[in-house]
Amino acid sequence: MHRVAAVNDQYFAVSALEQEAQGYQWPKGVIEKAEDLKAPGGFVFVRTGGLVIKRRVLLQEDMLYRFAARRYLGQGVDALVPLLNSPWWMNDDRMVLLLSRARSAGVPLVEMARRQLALPLAWTECDILVRARTKPRLVLAAHAGPGRTAQVKTQDGVVTESYTIATEAPHLFMDQLYVPGLGRHFALGGAGETNARAWFDLSTTAAFDPRARGLNP
């Protein structure tokens, strides 16, 4: 079967980025416990969150959404670009599903996002919702699948936050996307923001307050 080429194929093949997609916390470089001896670069990385990678998907003029931290906003007309430079996204149909589940449960959208997307407070404030469409005639490849349980521990090893989603609750399946080539992983050599500018149609970008009345029950 013919494989459709994507503009980020060179990153899709980088094993270190696939490891990040699966939840290996690369900035920590922890070597105290051999959780996975196949971790890249000879290091043993702590693993939490990430995806249970199910398939490779292609994005063509898709509208994507992500929850982020407002404090990373840039300046001027391209203020949203730093928030676009992340590999973690969801399609618009998953955004609609998330809204529906928040309304059905009668809980704030941010609370449902933390449950469904495994977003501990220590990782992100989730105080801004970003929307962007990929550029016309451009094809991006992404890893797709349900999220893994995410846990955040203190220095003494005490679990302070734990978010369990699709791996232990199949009926709450929430597909997520990891787009290789975006983000600040060392394997990118600082190319993430340049790629974000090249791959997203900046005229379609927008940001919303996820706590706004219209987005909450």
Image (cartoon, rainbow, N blue to C red):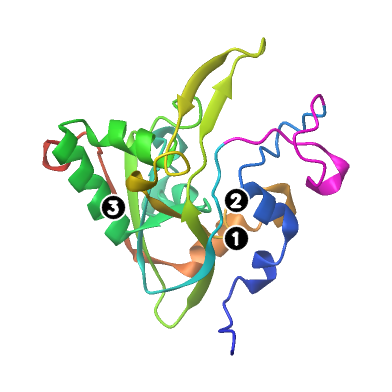
Q: Earlier in the sequence, mark 2 or mark 3?
A: 2
- Looking at the image, which residue is at 22% across and 31% down? 108
Q: Which residues are magenta?
A: 32-48
> Would you name the residue on which mark 3 appears?
95
Nearer to the camera, 7 or 206 = 7
Q: Earlier in the sequence, mark 1 or mark 2?
A: 2
Task: State if disc 2 and disc 1 touch (CB < 8 Å).
Answer: yes
Magenta-highlighted stretch: main secondary structure? Answer: loop
SS of the residue under disc 2: helix
> Would you name the residue on which mark 2 appears?
21
| Res 150 visible | yes
Give coordinates of residue 211: x percent, y percent. 22, 33
Question: Which residue type does callout 2 highlight?
Answer: Ala
In magenta segment, residue 45: yes
Q: Quadrant of residue 1?
A: bottom right
In screen coordinates, is 150 left or right of 109? right
Q: Quadrant of residue 210?
A: top left
Question: Which residue type does callout 3 highlight?
Answer: Met
Task: State if disc 3 and disc 1 touch (CB < 8 Å).
Answer: no
